[in-house]
Amino acid sequence: MSSTRTVAEGVTAPSSPTSQGSIRIRQVSHRYGRGGAAVTAVGPLDLDVPPGEFLVLVGASGCGKSTLLRLIAGFETATQGSIEVSGTAPAPGRTAGMVFQQPRLFPWQTVGGNVDLALKYAGVRRDQRPAQREELLRRVGLDDTAHRRIWEISGGQQQRVAIARALAAEHALLLLDEPFAALDALTRERLQDDLRRVGTESGRTAVFVTHSADEAVFLGSRIVVLSKRPGQIALDLPVDLPRTGVDADELRAAPEFAALRREVGLAVKSAAA
Ligand code: ADP
Ligand code: MG
């Protein structure tokens, strides 16, 4: 993004480099449908997310978590209020890398082919793609699988490819909508371990949706609990657990971890009541 243009030249104000990946939400609510069939899914709510934060949104099924994520991504336009990401209005495909519950890969392609397509779409030159592809696959723990077909690898590995693909676009913001919900418990823990590391290393902002208090405390640098529909902020909690130099299993076993998990679990329950 150019930082030399000015408002006077007739373009939107450049966001300062420090605002890259920031989210600013003001009095946002979103309604589906009209008249008697209208459903207000979320809001009104205000939320500020600084660059580099790993925010986890927790709440009961149907409280509007996916709606909020789609609003931030620019897939939906809020019926009220305003959203800015990195200082500008969100636009689909340009604002954030996304990971969904289902990996949504091209099944007939190889692992490497799927990442290549994402790099190509992100405008990376063809001769630079192989090195970047290898680096991305290494970061998500998929070295030596570039040649394999999507249908030959496990669900957990497919979700790793989806994360690599979301990282390929180099957006300052990653949005993840219950990406590990369909995985078995052990695979889920290993992916959580790696995502926590990748999130910290990459310095990107992340908004991760889950309804697991355990997952929220493990991954988040901050947790926001939403009330039942229309989702509003019921709890906004910083997580002061170490993010580097700590063993994942030790962290899960720590008393501070258990205390936070309990606090978030209770908040989710009472917010849903
Ligand atoms: P969550 O992700 O927390 O489970 P959603 O954001 O998917 O919740 O949905 C919130 C509410 O909005 C639900 O009542 C859901 O049925 C409704 N909803 C979601 N998407 C649509 C849509 N495209 N059209 C109509 N209603 C929708
Ligand atoms: Mg959802």
Image (tube, rainbow, N blue to C red):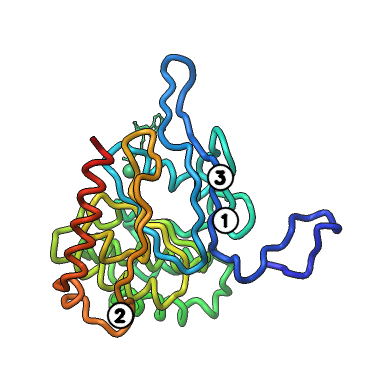
Image quadrant, ligand 2: top left
- Foreground label between 2 and 1: 1
Q: Is residue 96 visible?
A: yes
Residue 155, x across and y down, in percent: 22, 60
Name the residue: 58% across, 67% down. Answer: 123
Q: Between disc 3 and disc 1, whose residue precedes?
A: 3
Q: Mark 3 sits on what residue?
A: 26
Numbered disc total: 3
Horizontally, is 116 left or right of 210 in the view? right
- Foreground label between 3 and 2: 3
Q: Answer yes or no: disc 2 within 8 Å of ligand 2.
A: no
Q: Is residue 105 visible?
A: no
> In front here: 156 or 44?
44
Q: CA distance from mark 2 to mark 1?
A: 33 Å
Q: Secondary structure at mark 3?
A: strand
Looking at the rendered image, the quarter that the N terminus falls into is bottom right
Residue 150, x across and y down, in percent: 28, 62
Q: Secondary structure at mark 2?
A: loop
Q: Which mark is residue 143?
A: 2
